[in-house]
Amino acid sequence: MNLTGITHYSTTTKGIGGLLKKRISDFIVGEITLNEKILKNLAFGEWEGTKKIEFKPTESKDDAKEYLHFTMEKFNLDTNTALRKITRQCHCSQKRLGYAGMKDKRGITSQRISFWQPNIEKLKKFNDKFISLREPEWSNQKIEIGNHKGNYFEIKIRNILLNEKELRKETEECFQQMKKGLANYFGEQRFGGIRQITHRVGREFVNGNFEQAVLLYLTSPSEGEEKEIAIARKNLFKTKDYSKASKEFPSKFRYELAILHHLCKYPKDFIGAFQNLPKHLIYMFTHAYQSYLFNEIINLRIERGIGLEPIDGDVLKDGIVTVPLFGLDTKISEGIPGEIEKEILEKEKINLTNFKIKSFPELSCKGTIKKIKIIPKDLKLISIENDEFFEGKKLKISFSLDKGNYATTVSRELMKNP
């Protein structure tokens, strides 16, 4: 069952099937900076180990330039873990670092980072086998969320059972159709990976069900989880014994344990327990719920035969239809688009005032709008080869997307796996 609202396809090709992210190096992401430079993958790859790249930052010679900008390339790490590794070795707060956007964990990704008044000697000594730093440059500005154009992707899809001729035909036909635009679904990583839990927790917070939200986060199972954590979640669901759970949850589940330790002391303080999570994680829950509702608006437009093209009542940006990421300040559209938006809210049994969460303001959302169609740029079929891990073929493709859009939107359309 798909819990994230990613339901329909925008292309009519039959799909090539296959497998994503067999190897870390099968998924490469390079940030596209504001001056349209694509950050290259230089340190990590299919070669053994890490290629050493010179990183010799110097002290700023301009008092107005307090931010050191540099490229961070990481291997199989999420952005926040990588930043935490840097600040730990430099013995400073993570608040000193800025970045333009989160990058995938499973893959090799490159992005620009800003570091306010770094200790240069400590930064020079930074060493981690999964992180490479390069290209230092002083600036008078912090890198903020959204300070980039987009991202370049280079992806390998493996275990494709089509022959080379058919694979090339299906890929090129799908690429041609993609140039007309795809439904701009939020990808599954927005919703918490294999558990698909983030937006469901957000829904409970928006509805004021704080205890249910926290217990859902702690106890919701997943088929892909290890046996030890699956049993711990099941036991907590049955008993609500926080003390016992704090001993049963494996140590690597530090966020769950932080919540449990708080509930051991204050069993009814569910908001306080959740506030033990990092701020960047807290706000993701209601944002994920916004994203789920956005996906559902796209689905209803497609199912009503409206699709992605403008009709009376639509709000356009750059000639493309936008719909709400619901929040307190959202203005419902006119006409049929507005009726669809109201229908989604009614189906969820919420109204816009729910997005102001007085007792947990960190989770409140003002709302914004987002385009419902994306057009991938520079779609390229790079190679088709025999797969060294499977009997099928290996396809390598590349493309670019504007910021805030998901590579899985493109790969899903091409693969069309169940």
Image (cartoon, rainbow, N blue to C red):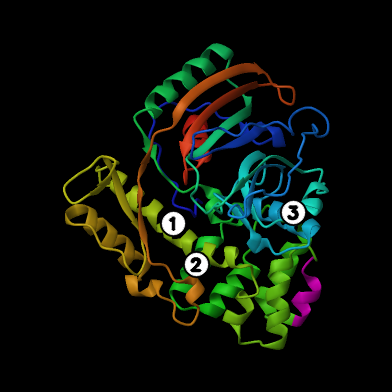
Q: Give the magenta-colored segment's residue range.
A: 243-250
Residue 63 sits in which quadrant? Answer: bottom right
For disc 2, the marked residue is 202
Question: Is residue 378 found left or right of 268 in the rendered image?
Answer: left
Q: Is residue 268 magenta?
A: no
Position of residue 392 measured from the top left corner of the image (x, y, whole percent):
66, 21
Position of residue 397 measured from the top left corner of the image (x, y, whole percent):
56, 25
Q: Is residue 244 magenta?
A: yes
Q: Residue at x 48, y 65 (%)?
A: 286
Give the Cα separation between the discs numbered 2 and 1. 10 Å
Residue 66 visible in the snapshot: yes
Task: Check contact, mark 2 vs mark 1: CB within 8 A.
Answer: yes
For disc 1, the marked residue is 292
What is the count of numbered marks?
3
Q: Residue at x 77, y 69 (%)?
A: 249
| Residue 86: numbered disc | 3
| Residue 71: numbered disc | none
Decide: few, some or many residues near mark 1? Use Cα within 10 Å; few <14, some 14-19, many ≥20. Answer: many
Task: Check contact, mark 3 vs mark 1: CB within 8 A.
Answer: no
Residue type at tag 2: Gly
Circle 3: element type: helix
Task: Give the camera-side residue of 14 and 357.
Answer: 357
Decide: few, some or many residues near mark 3? Use Cα within 10 Å; few <14, some 14-19, many ≥20. Answer: many
Residue type at tag 1: Tyr
Circle 2: element type: helix
Give the Cα separation between the discs numbered 3 and 1. 33 Å
Question: Is residue 339 found left or right of 179 in the rendered image?
Answer: left
Residue type at tag 3: Ile
